[in-house]
Image (cartoon, coloured by chain):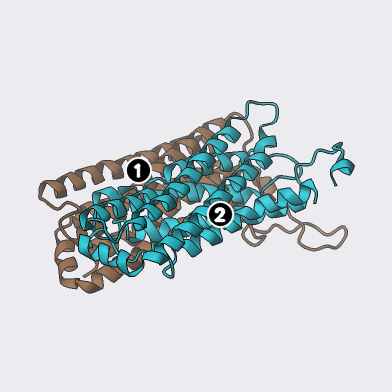
Amino acid sequence: MNLKQTHIWTAYTGWIFTAGFLIAVCPLLAWTIPPHHGPSFTALQVKQFYMEHLNRIRAGAFIGMIASAFYYSWGAAIAAMLRRVENGRPPILTYTQLGAVGVGVFNSVLYFFWMAYCAFRADTMDPVMLQSLNDFQYILLEFEVFPLSLWALAIGFCILMDQSERPVFPRWVAWVNFWFSGLVMTGQFMIFFRVGPMAWNGLLAVYWPAFVFFFWICAMSTFMIIALKKEIGVVPNADTQRYL
Amino acid sequence: MSSDTRSSSAAALAVPVTGRAGAEPKATSRWLRGHVPGEAGIWIFILGDMTLYIFLFAGFMHDRMKEVDVFNQSAATLHINTGGINTLLLLVSSILVVFGVRALREKIKKQYAPLFFALAFLCGAGFVVNKYIEYSDLVMKGFTPYWNMFYLWYYVLTGIHLTHLLGGMWVLIYLFRVAQKAQREEITIRGVESGASFWHCVDLLWVVLFPLLYLMR
């Protein structure tokens, strides 16, 4: 085991998070992406869904919570690799990224925690209360994407300003970040609507942000792994013998 | 590939096509040489944006098929003339941006470039004012996003387009400043082409939105 290998594993945690998240939320388990129901469901219908899928939802929450931990090592890896772009200057964009990593992981952890909390006593809970707690889950998932937007902006700017001979990421990856940053928050108006594409089970609140989010993670993970394998960022006179 | 980043037209023309030693370089258009306007990343952004719109249009058509009569009746309440003026404003702004880029390539007098971008910005501002008047009028008549599905889609589609347009106006300000800078020093055309491409994308989206919302029966 050496440092290079450990760093590459860290980049793979992005894939682990993605796989774990998607397995947790798919229709076989928690059934939140794509969502089984919407805000127009009555309280009794929501309770019926929970009663029919109780252990599956609990299993989804369990897997998702474990997957969430792998999110921050991936975010830290990106920030670490892009740190050198700001060399010589205060690492503002790096710190922005690290702060956003914290928020993103918090969102993911809280989401699965809440899913578990809803499913914990769903069988004895009042349907109206269960419906309200269930709403919390979806609003949390989709409403809190704006911190991720600033995260991606910071990454994008770092990549564009990377003028080194061996840039960490290809230049066009910055534009994937800008695309993600601008278009992941199409669901922000979901709190105004309970039907249609803007509702929390609608096209703009779930499907599109999920697509953009996972495309972004896959692109960044791929290029992260490539950059680490090519040892981009290892300074020329680094003592690699000791750590190989 | 940044084979054509300089704004002078001489660099745009002289490229040897044959590999023969001593052969005269043939002048070829940059399009035949595989020129990508702006940088590759802006096309990721633009095509990614269009992907969103493909999903939006599909969603709109899906909901329309469920209640065609409601959609048709509601569409009839929109102001076609206002929509038409908006379309004209954006088309004119696009041609002005084209002239601005050409001016920076010195196909037209370079000193006009800032003026072209400024006029394009004014067209965009006109669009925004027009949209505000249109929205106000519709809301005062009671046609809010909560009225029916058509109006929900109308506000979603035109609202998202409006945010893109406002972003495009920031880009036009950037183009204006680059054009001013170009009067004094050499600039790379890549950023200008990227910005211009984004504005054309915004225009293209409206050209598809207008018939979809206002004209389709």
Q: Chain of mark 1?
A: B
Residue matched to label 1: B124
Q: Residue at x 54, y 48 (%)?
A: A177
The reply to whether callout 2 and callout 1 are in contact (CB within 8 Å) is no
Which hue is chain B drawn in?
A: brown
Q: Is residue A105 above or below residue A213?
A: above
- In the visual, does B173 lie left or right of B102? left
Taking the spot 87% from the left edge, 57% from the top edge, the residue there is B22
Which image quadrant for residue B149?
A: bottom left
Q: CA distance from mark 2 to mark 1?
A: 35 Å
Above or below residue A87? Residue A192 is: below
**Mark 2 nearby-residue class (10 Å; few <14, some 14–19, many ≥20):** some
Secondary structure under badge 1? Answer: helix
> Residue A130 versus residue B108: which sits nearer the camera?
A130
A106 vs A194: above or below: above
Q: Is residue A195 left or right of residue B147?
A: right
Q: Does residue A43 appear to the left or right of B61 in the view shown?
A: left
